[in-house]
Image (spheres, grey):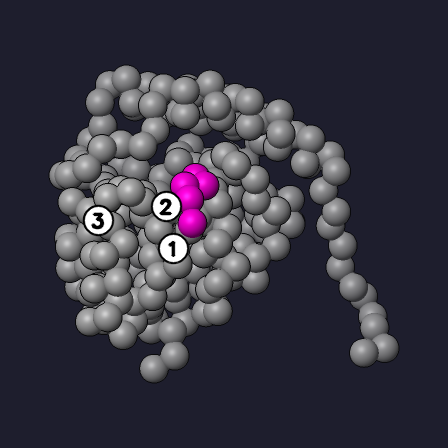
Amino acid sequence: MKSKFTIIVPVFNESENLQRVEKELLSYIKVATVPTSVLFVNDGSTDESQQLIEAICKRNEAFDFILFKENRGLSAALKAGFDHVQSELTGYIDSDLQTTPQDFNVLLEHIGDYDLVTGVRANRKDSFIKNMSSKIANGIRRAFTHDGMDDTGCPLKVIKTDVAKRIPMFKGLHRFLPAMVLLQQGKIIQVPVQHFPRMAGKAKFGLWNRLLGPLIDCFAYLWMKKKYINYEVKKSSK
């Protein structure tokens, strides 16, 4: 059956998590409200992640992968995923599984009326410092973008693929996906999703990534917003 929904799973040194990722995604595919497939994007892992990914894809027809030559970051991994996905809808989940793929069905309930549905993590199971830095960064971002979103860092999203492919990605822009959809005059909504403690592996973002880096990215977004080209064709001879 042809997939209508592809879940992008960025991976960077997550060998300790990948067997659980396989189990959870297979469980979700069985109850997904639309035909679903999975695309791993290996962002230049230096551990055993690639061997595990290839084994997973070999034994599961609904799983595929992309392997980067070197580490390029989360935004690049998402961009590659958007470029390669052929299904009508695209999802995104982190391989640390602090969110559950089961909640994709909650997001999919809304995608018919919206171009992007993003999760907002309820009762976050992170450290005090991580939670506070995230709240501050989200507040700064909202002040710049006026996107109305409380948790753009939530690693659980569903987006219409044709919208995703038009997003001009740059490093750090994964935090600005809702704002970039608004630049396309698209519609966005946030929906509460579950959140869990990290079970294995190490977090890839520190204080700089969560707070100071996003502040700099806000200025890049403002520049892009000013220069962004947006048009609709009213009539054509072709």
Count of number-bearing discs: 3
Q: Position of residue 56 (x, y in %)?
A: 21, 64
Residue marked by disc 3: 48
**Residue at 81% of width from left, 66% of height from top?**
234
| Of callouts 1 and 3, the N-terminal one | 3
Marks 3 and 1: in contact by CB < 8 Å? Answer: no
Q: In the figure, residue 226 lies in which quadrant? A: top right
Residue interval drawn in magenta: 69-73
Q: Is residue 44 left or right of residue 96?
A: right
| Of callouts 1 and 2, the N-terminal one | 2
**Residue at 57% of width from left, 27% of height from top?**
218
**Residue at 52% of width from left, 21% of height from top?**
215
Q: Secondary structure at mark 1?
A: strand
Within 10 Å of the Cα at label 3, are there few (<14), some (14-19), or many (20+) other Cα atoms? few
Q: In the figure, residue 23 lies in which quadrant? A: bottom left
Residue marked by disc 2: 44
Image quadrant containing the N terminus: bottom left
Residue marked by disc 1: 67
Amino acid identity at mark 2? Gly
Q: Position of residue 78 (x, y in %)?
A: 45, 49
224 in relation to 137, above or below: below
Amino acid identity at mark 1? Leu
**Residue at 30% of width from left, 67% of height from top?**
63
Q: Secondary structure at mark 2?
A: loop
Within 10 Å of the Cα at label 1, are there few (<14), some (14-19), or many (20+) other Cα atoms? some
Marks 2 and 1: in contact by CB < 8 Å? Answer: yes
Q: Magenta stretch: dominant SS?
A: loop
For the residues labelled 3 and 2, the Cα–Cα distance comes to 11 Å
Amino acid identity at mark 3? Glu
